Each structure stands twice: as structure tokens, then as C-alpha cells.
Image (cartoon, rainbow, N blue to C red):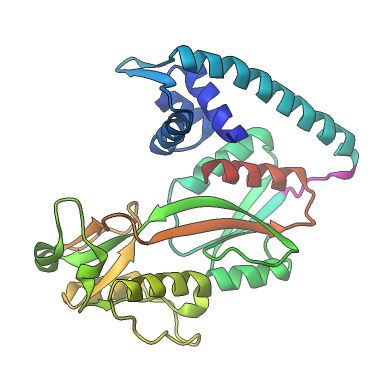
Amino acid sequence: MEIRELRAFVTVVEEGGLSAAARRLHVSQSALSQTVRSMERRLGTQLLVRTHAGASPTESGQLLLTGARALLAQHDDLLASVASAAGSTRSLLGRIRVGVPLEFPIDLLPKAMAALADEYPDTKVDLSHASSAAQLTALSAGEIDVALVRDRPADPSLDAVLVVREPMGVILTAARAEQLAEPTGVQLHRLAGLEWIAFTRSESPDWYDEVAATLHGHGVAVPAPRTAAERPVPVEVKLAAAGTGRAFGFAAPGWAHPLPEGIAWHPLIADPIVRRTWAVWRASARERDLAALVAILDSTG
């Protein structure tokens, strides 16, 4: 059981429900609900009684609550002692430069920045959009402090935490969806015969290869990788290609772009393609506000 899971459970009990706890933790209510259900599955017992009025602990939940509070107090006291001892050597950045991928959940960063502002009100956060590869280059050059990327780097000089997992869905015309979709979504192998509107491999090589391998495994043809010299596929081009009925594109459930008439988003059955975004920073970094932002992003993963 992870500390963040125990803290999430304690917060739900203290707030009397998932909605208020999610706001306090700066996470989505669905993610918090999944965390609690995962804990219940692993422990083999129900921890919360959920009603229209909120949530309260069961007998097993009360037992966990008592132990979790004691463990969290010890954990927090230990970290505070270590941080206090090292405090004289740890400074503040004051301005944290964050790279952001071209498609990213629209509510995640505002919540993270709000949580950081509660702890470090004088620290500013600057955002810049770039591909994963460009962000990692900028991170190595000292031009940004945190990179939000699709590929987790193996470089030992960098640290990383998982920020968000997004089961990808598919964008299709209504006519194609009528042919291919089932009540719960689209089977990936049913897309065989359509063209994947692919992103440039150089943007995120590992993520591209993962998608391509999954498509191959389901009998869906993968076009030759676009060259690094080509620009990223604009949203308008992606939608126009899907609108022909001969192609499909992937998108996360919370895709922020409005879809034109005649095109709709559908989930992929069994979530065969899941996009992960990692927060990456220099392992040598010791600034307190940077560490706080990383911790906040870590709690959302």
C-alpha cells in the first residue's frame, strides 16, 4: 500500500465524501474513486459505505483509518525532520519553467499550479508547448526545469514520475462508426483497412513505436514514419483526414478540440492503447518549490 493511497483514503473519510476529498487533493473524483476501489480489491474488504450523503468508513475502514493516520504522522514527521536538517542548503527556484506536450488534460496543470501557489505563493510557473524530444533537449540545456513527456528517459541524470494515464479512443465519421462500433466502443482490429493519422515519430519515438506495435498486433497497417523534417499534424488536418471516412485518429477522452458535425469520438474496447505522460526533471535539482510541484504531479498519476 502506497503512502499516497493511504493519504487519499484518510482524506475521503475526513471530508466525508469523494467530491470534497478530490478538491482538497487536487485530483479528479473518478481517479480518487479508482484509488479507493483498488485498495478495497487488494485488501479483500469494503472500506467505505457510499450513500447519497457521502462516504463513511466500514469497520474494516475504521481499522485502516486508525493505522493510516499513525503511519502518515510518522511519515510526515520524518520528512519534516530531514527537510529541516537540509533546509539551509535547499533554495527556491522562484520561477519554474515547465514544458507541456501538444495534447494534455486541460484541468491537470491549473490544479497543480493552484496547489503549488498554496505552498509557495511567490513562485511563478511558465508553460511552453513542445514535443517530448524537444522538451528533453531543452531540459538538458537548462532551458526548462520540468518536462512533461510521453517517453520515460533512461538517462540516470534525470528523475521521472508518472503524471497521467489516458486510455485512447478513436475519431471516426458517423458512417464508419455505424459499421465498426459496438455499444461499448470499437474493437481495435476493426480499424484494419483504414489509415492511421500518425504523429511524427521523432516527436516521441518510444510512444510511436508502442502504438505502431499494438496496431501491427491487431492487423492494422502502419504507414511509414513521417520524417523529422515534417511538422506535427495540425488538429485541422487530423479532423479533415478522419472526415474522409478512410482514416482514423487517436484522442484521449477529454480531448479539448470540438469535433465537426459528422465526426465522433469512440472508446477503444479493453483500452489496448494507453498514453502515459511523465514529469521529468534533473536528478541533481534540490529546490524546494520544484520538489513540491513534482510531488503534486506525482499525486495525480
Residue 175, image x, y percentages: 9, 67
Q: Residue furthest front?
A: 44
Residue 168, image x, y percentages: 35, 59
Seen in the picture, residue 229 relative to 26 is either above or below; the reply is below
Residue 225, image x, y percentages: 42, 84
What is the total number of numbered labels drawn onto the structure image? 0
Start-end of magenta stretch: 89-94
Residue 240, image x, y percentages: 23, 74
Residue 262 visible in the shown view: no
Image-quadrant location for residue 283: bottom right
90 in magenta: yes
Q: Residue at x 39, y 75 (%)?
A: 212
Q: Nearer the viewer, residue 60 or 105?
A: 60
Residue 290 visible in the shown view: yes
Seen in the picture, residue 33 relative to 97 is either above or below; the reply is above
Q: Residue at x 48, y 28 (%)?
A: 43
Q: Residue at x 90, y 39 (%)?
A: 88
Q: Nearer the viewer, residue 139 or 209?
A: 209
Q: Is residue 99 left or right of residue 70?
A: left
112 in magenta: no
Seen in the picture, residue 217 relative to 54 is either above or below; the reply is below
Seen in the picture, residue 249 relative to 110 is either above or below; the reply is below
User: Where's the N terminus, which quadrant?
Assistant: top right
Tell me which secondary structure the magenta stretch mostly adopts.
loop
Q: Residue at x 41, y 20 (%)?
A: 48
Image-quadrant location for residue 20: top left
Q: Is residue 70 left or right of residue 237?
A: right
